[in-house]
Image (tube, rainbow, N blue to C red):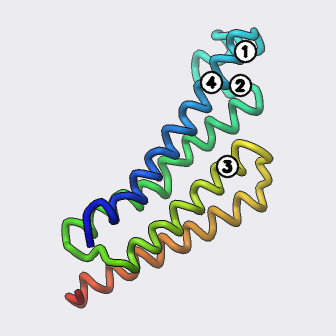
Amino acid sequence: MSIQFVLLPLFVEVLLTFAVMFGMMYCRTSSLHRGETRFEDIALREPNWPVRASQFAYSFSNQFELPVLFYVLTILEIITHHADLLFVVLAWIFVVTRWMQALVHVTSNNVRVRGGFYGIGALVLVIMWLIYIVRILLALP
């Protein structure tokens, strides 16, 4: 399996993180320029941002939770030469659920829908880790 094929889902996940970050920056800067938010109200990380800016901020923060385990697993799969088609398919499913979860988070913020995408992605990531652990411990290809 080519390294590009294995890394492409990781790159798309990284792009999601940057997209959400730029959305957060835009919302926060706009809020400050319009005077909706004052620097004094947010200087010590107080949660005084408008709803839209908060949605992006929480979504951005969320990109450093489950995805970290995905990044580590991808690196381990490459280093140990265990990355195969199954891994790549599951990686794409994980990344698509992350994009969908982030999209819901920064738009309607419907917690049930957002939670569904989060849950599916988390389950896929658990499966990916279990497959990897079994392969390593049992010395399987």
User: CA separation, marks 4 and 1?
Assistant: 13 Å
Residue beneath disc 4: 26
Nearer to us in this view, 129 or 104: 104
- Mark 1 crowdedness (10 Å alpha carbons): few <14, some 14-19, many ≥20: some
Depicted 137 relative to depicted 78: above or below? below
Report the side of 57 relative to 73 (left or right).
right
Q: Nearer the viewer, mark 2 or mark 3?
A: 3
Q: Which mark is residue 49?
A: 2
Q: Nearer the viewer, mark 3 or mark 1?
A: 3
- Residue 44 figure quarter: top right
Which secondary structure lies at badge 3?
helix
Report the side of 85 relative to 122 (left or right).
left
The tag earlier along the polypeptide, 3 or 4, is: 4
Q: Nearer the viewer, mark 4 or mark 1?
A: 4
Q: Are marks 4 and 2 in contact (CB under 8 Å)?
A: no
Which secondary structure lies at badge 2?
loop
User: CA separation, marks 3 and 1?
Assistant: 24 Å
Which secondary structure lies at badge 1?
loop
The tag earlier along the polypeptide, 4 or 1, is: 4
Q: Are marks 2 and 1 in contact (CB under 8 Å)?
A: yes
Question: For the point 28% across and 85% down, which residue is it?
Answer: 135
Q: Which mark is residue 37?
A: 1
Residue beneath disc 3: 103
Measured as percent of width and height from the top left, residue 65 is found at: 49, 52
Nearer to us in this view, 33 or 2: 2
Which secondary structure lies at badge 4?
helix
Identify the amino acid type marked 4. Tyr
Question: For the point 20% across and 88% down, which residue is it?
Answer: 139
Identify the amino acid type marked 1. Thr
